[in-house]
């Protein structure tokens, strides 16, 4: 992975499509009133859901409230979960809605996620530098988490939310579009911009010699 | 295929959502253009770094408040 030579992109199953073996059993038990089964599901996903609400709201208090409300809402509506998607994907949709409500409340002037975003911007990358092998390993885990959290927080919400769902939670493009009420082309367009912007932001940390 | 066209197809290329002819055309360009190779490689790594990052542990106080809120709701259900 050290050379700039491009390896073919490996095909991979999206984790949103990979169900932990016991998840359907836990969900079915929780739907039948087994509270400890629901608590197990909460324990399994609380860290990821908090990261999601934190990345979307960029506010710790809102992120905590959105996470709590998401789990409570999931519990209340558990019987409505049909098992057509992975439980986690269903939970992510609930958490995204809660986080977006917080974001809109705190920042009413924020660009609506539904609006067309500017497409006139030149997307051609200007900083083209190799990162060398495993650039992320030059940083301690907590330092890396901080860097990732900061750079994603610098994205405008329409880009941040799409990237969060598509590339961090690994929902499919169609699932992301459905969760956000966007068209598939809109998701693709925002995703491309988000990826390029994040690449550019990470370049300052990961280009060769950046941390030496 | 020029550099600008590579960038506009980048997301679909990385997601393997392109038809084979367009994909081959992109790979032909990448074989000749070092800058595009670096952009494609570093964008792919950007996705991988985010995707592979472990979420930080939930702060203890936040975790406690979550489980208290859940317990309160669950008690109400049981009652």
Image (tube, coloured by chain):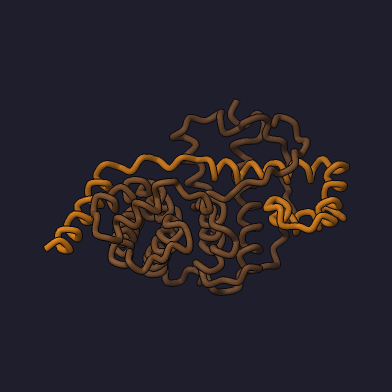
Task: Find residue A167 and report its horizontal and vertical position in percent.
Answer: 56, 52
Measuring 34% from the left and 57% from the top, which residue is drawn there? A28
The image shows residue A30, relative to residue A128, as above or below, that is: below
Residue B58 visible to an observer of this rendering: yes
* Horizontal side, residue A28 vs residue A196: left or right: left
Task: Find residue A41 and report its horizontal and vertical position in percent.
Answer: 34, 50
Q: Residue furthest top?
A: A212
Chain letter, orange in picture: B
- Work out whether residue A142 or residue A67 is closer to the camera in this orientation and state it: A67
- Work out whether residue B33 or residue A68 is closer to the camera in this orientation and state it: A68
Measuring 32% from the left and 50% from the top, which residue is drawn there? A42
Q: Quadrant of the N terminus of chain A?
A: top right
Q: Quadrant of the C terminus of chain A?
A: top right
Measuring 57% from the left and 34% from the top, which residue is drawn there? A136
* Horizontal side, residue A28 vs residue A36: left or right: right
Based on the displayed image, in which of its 4 quarters is residue A183 positioned? bottom right
Measuring 43% from the left and 62% from the top, which residue is drawn there? A83
The image shows residue B32, relative to residue A99, as above or below, that is: above
Chain A, which colour?
brown
* Horizontal side, residue A186 vs residue A102: left or right: right
Based on the displayed image, in which of its 4 quarters is residue B72 positioned? bottom left
Task: Find residue A33 and report its horizontal and vertical position in percent.
Answer: 24, 59
């Amino acid at each position: 992975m050290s050379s700039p030579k491009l390896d073919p992109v490996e095909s991979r199953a999206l984790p949103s499509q990979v169900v932990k073996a016991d998840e359907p059993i836990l969900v079915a038990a929780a739907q039948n009133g087994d509270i400890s089964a629901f608590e197990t599901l909460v324990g399994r996903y609380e860290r990821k859901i908090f990261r999601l609400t934190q990345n979307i709201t960029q506010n710790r208090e809102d992120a905590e409230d959105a996470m709590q409300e998401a789990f409570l809402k999931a519990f209340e509506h558990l019987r409505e979960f049909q098992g057509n998607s992975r439980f986690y994907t269903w939970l992510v949709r609930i958490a995204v809605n809660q986080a977006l409500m917080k974001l809109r409340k705190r920042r009413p002037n924020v660009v609506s996620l539904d609006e067309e975003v500017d497409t006139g911007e030149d997307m051609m990358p200007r900083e083209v530098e190799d990162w060398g092998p495993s650039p992320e390993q030059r940083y301690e885990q907590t330092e890396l988490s901080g860097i990732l959290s900061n750079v994603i927080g610098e994205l405008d919400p329409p880009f941040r939310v799409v990237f969060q769902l598509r590339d961090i939670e690994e929902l499919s493009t169609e699932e992301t579009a459905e969760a956000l009420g966007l068209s598939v082309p809109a998701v693709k367009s925002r995703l491309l911009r988000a990826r390029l912007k994040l690449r550019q932001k990470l370049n300052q940390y990961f280009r060769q010699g950046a941390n030496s | 295929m020029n550099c600008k066209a590579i960038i506009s197809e980048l997301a679909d290329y990385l997601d393997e959502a392109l038809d084979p002819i367009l994909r081959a055309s992109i790979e032909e360009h990448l074989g000749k253009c070092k800058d595009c190779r670096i952009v494609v490689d570093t964008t792919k790594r950007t996705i991988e770094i985010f995707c592979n990052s472990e979420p930080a542990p939930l702060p203890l106080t936040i975790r406690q408040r979550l489980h208290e809120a859940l317990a309160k709701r669950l008690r109400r259900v049981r009652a």
